Amino acid sequence: MKKSILIISLLGIFSCTSKDIPIEEISFSHNNSNAQPSLVSNNGSLSLTWISSDEDMNAELNFRQFKDGDWLNPMTLAVGSDWFVNWADFPTHAVSGDQVLTSYLKKSAGGSYTYDVFLSLHNLSGEKIKEDFVLHTDDTQSEHGFVSITSNKNNGFYVSWLDGRNTIEKGPEGQHKPMTIRFAEVTSNGAIVNEKELDSATCDCCQTSITATSKGPVVVYRDRSEKEVRDIYITRKINGVWEAPFPVHNDGWIINGCPVNGPKVASNLNNLAVGWFTVSDGRPIVNLSFSKSNGESFDSPIKINTLDAIGRVDVEFLNEKEVLISYIEGDDNGTFLRIKKVSIDGKASAPITISEIDGGRNTGVPQLEKFNDDIFIVWTVFENDRNQLKSAKLSLENI
């Protein structure tokens, strides 16, 4: 593994001087093509999963932990030659206690988007608890994916996903029924319980996001109305009951197709932060909105981007009142992966450019996490005719 130090110039908001920010870039060296990262920080652990695949589409799901200033050797948690491997619908994972739950997608039929969500449950040491089991209870040959997983107070896991079991049916006018979003819990021995449909009509291919609060799980996703309004919605489980979904903000974005650009939610005590991509008056935007009431209501959105937004956001609380948001934006001079620090009172820092990147699908969905006193960002690059992972680390004191 190679390390190098980058110097990023940050222009201050209230001065004309610049500030040099050292960023330690860690290159991942691994055989074959490597992409679809999922980065998670939880209870003093930083971990990464990703898919390594060859030219024949033989795939491996790898798991790696960061300890003592370096990435440990990877462990292979699942392998297959019949997987659905996609830049936008990628495996995810979560750590709960000394367990890790991972997801991946297997083809169920010959259609382009007929695949199932499979799970594997391991101890962090690599010991198998339960592997290769299906998340959802239907047996339809339809699309299932865009999974989000989070820890259930170190006692199992919460999982949300998009579920296409209804799409094989047709409505009264002959149109296929919409995609749905569902939720389930996975226990520490791999049992799937409390499965429930959360919304009967969602966007088909935008990532979902889930967080665990002191009052229960919260799920955020892109909704789809009968008039093709595709705004970001939230639903919460309060006192054991799922509430009716409602919009984080009424963007009113009408689009006759999926933008493949999901939201991200993060929580800290009673505060929530949601970042998302939308379009307003023909201009692409990345928004961030805070809730100080555990998601019961949200403040007006804060516009994050200065150039044309591509989106693909991630959000991480730095403390109770500040978050870091990562996003992609660009103009005629290039496309950039950037981060901003935003406080709950609406103040935003100048952007920090992590890297100039490809704005296409090869970049995937960059991952952002806080670990100890550092920020880690992982994304995908295309080098030497294959995908590879890159990771940047920067100290919180420099943000």
Image: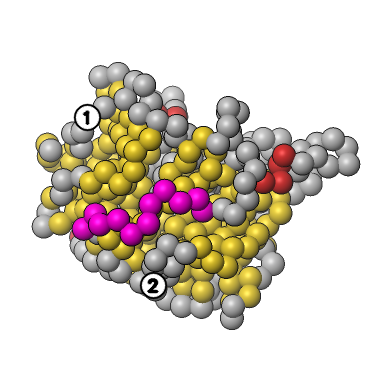
For numbered disc 1, what is the local secondary structure? loop
Front in this rendered view, residue 372 or 330:
372
How many marks do you count on the picture?
2
Extreme residue in the top direction: 385
Residue type at mark 1 is Asn
Q: Residue at x 31, y 34 (%)?
A: 52
Q: Which of marks 2 and 1 is nearer the N terminus?
A: 1
Extreme residue in the right direction: 172
Query: Toward which corner of the image does residue 8 lie, by quadrant?
Result: top left
Tell me which segment is drawn in magenta: 125-135
Is 310 above or below relative to 70? Answer: above
Residue 317: x and y, percent? Answer: 37, 64
Residue 354: x and y, percent? Answer: 29, 41
Is 170 part of what is drawn in magenta?
no
Q: Is 153 on the left or on the right of 285, as rendered?
A: left
Front in this rendered view, residue 316 or 156:
156
Would you name the residue on which mark 2 appears? 155
Would you name the residue on which mark 1 appears? 31
Residue 361: x and y, percent? Answer: 44, 30
